[in-house]
Amino acid sequence: MNSLTDAVPRTVRELNRLNRLNRNTSGMCRGYVQANVIMLPNTDAFDFLRFCVQNAAACPVLEVTAPGQWEPVLTAPGSDLRTDVGRYEVHRDGVRTEVRTDVCDVVDDHMCSFLLGCSYTFEHVLVEARIPMRHQEQRIDGAPMFRTNRSCVPAGRFHGELVVTMRPIPHNRISETVRLTAAHPEAHGAPVSVGCPEALGIMDLNRPDWGSPVALSPGDVPVFWACGVTATNILRNAQLAYAITHSSGFMFITDVEVTP
Amino acid sequence: MNSLTDAVPRTVRELNRLNRLNRNTSGMCRGYVQANVIMLPNTDAFDFLRFCVQNAAACPVLEVTAPGQWEPVLTAPGSDLRTDVGRYEVHRDGVRTEVRTDVCDVVDDHMCSFLLGCSYTFEHVLVEARIPMRHQEQRIDGAPMFRTNRSCVPAGRFHGELVVTMRPIPHNRISETVRLTAAHPEAHGAPVSVGCPEALGIMDLNRPDWGSPVALSPGDVPVFWACGVTATNILRNAQLAYAITHSSGFMFITDVEVTP
């Protein structure tokens, strides 16, 4: 899809550090785990981690750093979470106030960083199995995302609805799709719902809440996975005085290899 | 094995609440998830939860309560973590100072409770599959536990070695044992090591660090699973000013059913 498909993660992280790459990471570094990044004051960190653990399909925890520690030593040693993402957003009182290419000047030593799994990770596994990814065929950056009517389990001030991604899957490949993605709990795991958008409160597949609509081919069924945007959405609901996240689609790429 | 094998969890919790049952819960409430209980001041809670998440095989998180909340609403609604365990231990500065049948008078509203998975949960699954549990055959309460030479991933002041349980398994049932327990990540999941105790630094299977030795039958191989005692052991290392745990083997029994 692009020249960075076969890049190693360190290359992409270094390009981001030099601000020479300002792109959605969908399809980059094939075979490596990608991550949502969330930075919070340590006073909110315990409740947020409780939220993640208790809503693990939407918020699979890859790594959590201690306050003021910007290197995720387990999943990307040598990296720096303040610089190695292509685009960041700064939120104050629940409102996005700034978009930046690094956050060195706006973090403080009381902030903890969370790396949460991302479905970009498993798309590669599906593509390898020759299961069609319609949004890629249609040259759309990332699967469309929808707010659902399903509540997450709240923790402290963190609460809100589950957000899902939708991928059209041929009806006779759904069993294989379930089996393959179930093996990747670190990337949202198996679908949460198959074939019945209304039951999730999704009334029009052509009007996603985030991203662009993707057309179904004849014989396709809409399949829904829990999505990391759930986390950024509940952050907004919590109206934290201060938080930093990656920009949707501009993920942090870890050195962790996707197990087949 | 005993008259409470087929009891529902609420019955056992109520007997514990009335202090009418002071027993190891191995084999009780067949088909329900059992849990380690750990109560900590909220100042230590974030680092401890980070430790659990990053050492998930040893410390699979079932539920975490907010400070001062004693009812685990997700896994055992209506229960009370201060009374519904058969035996508790109170630790001060890393030393066990008291053993109690309830902790109502010694908790405070700044403490959070952690429920972590327990291998009692999957023993039932193995028994159903007619895989022999030698410790049960030998009338020993619980599998023997060993300290290993493998370090956990540290988080803040929490650090220490992985502790494992050992169960002798017939050589020709190991594949099935792996498959069945891998399906239960909430109960430590698949074995961490099979057949080579020396590689874990375990020099004598007849001298466990906790529990009683269990004899291997001809054709048996020692199989090792990550163990929840890892958590109580690292608590001791951390020398917390104050912590409360269940007593080893006296687990909290949740209403969560074990999926086959």
Image (cartoon, coloured by chain):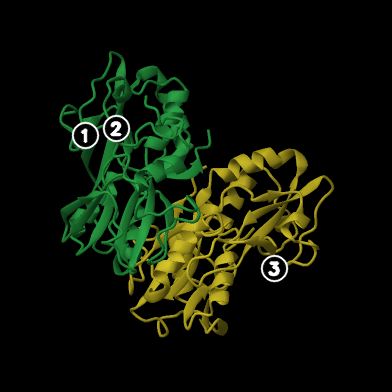
Chain colours: A green, B yellow
B218 sits to left or right of A191: right
Occupied quadrant, residue B79: bottom left
**Disc 3 marks which residue?**
B211
**Disc 2 marks which residue?**
A142
Query: Between marks 1 and 2, how big is the CA–CA gap?
Result: 7 Å
In the rendered view, would you say A99 is above or below B63?
above
Q: What is the number of the mark on residue A244? A: none
In the rendered view, would you say A1 is above or below B72?
above
User: Label 2 is found on which chain of the structure?
Assistant: A
In the rendered view, would you say B61 is above or below A197?
below
The residue type indicated by label 2 comes to Gly
Instruction: Residue A249: give x, y in percent of width and height.
Output: 29, 39
User: Label 1 is found on which chain of the structure?
Assistant: A
Going 44% across and 20% down the picture, which residue do you hit? Answer: A130
User: Is residue B249 in view from this perspective?
Assistant: yes
| Quadrant of the frame with the N terminus of chain A | top left
Residue closer to the observer: B214 or B149? B149
The residue type indicated by label 1 comes to Gly
Occupied quadrant, residue A97: bottom left
Query: Between marks 3 and 2, how big is the CA–CA gap?
Result: 52 Å
Q: What is the number of the mark on residue A211? A: 1
Instruction: Residue B207: give x, y in percent of width and height.
Output: 78, 67
Is disc 1 in contact with disc 2, using a CB cutoff of under 8 Å?
Answer: yes
Nearer-N-terminus badge (1/2): 2
The residue type indicated by label 3 comes to Gly
Query: Between marks 3 and 1, how big is the CA–CA gap?
Result: 56 Å
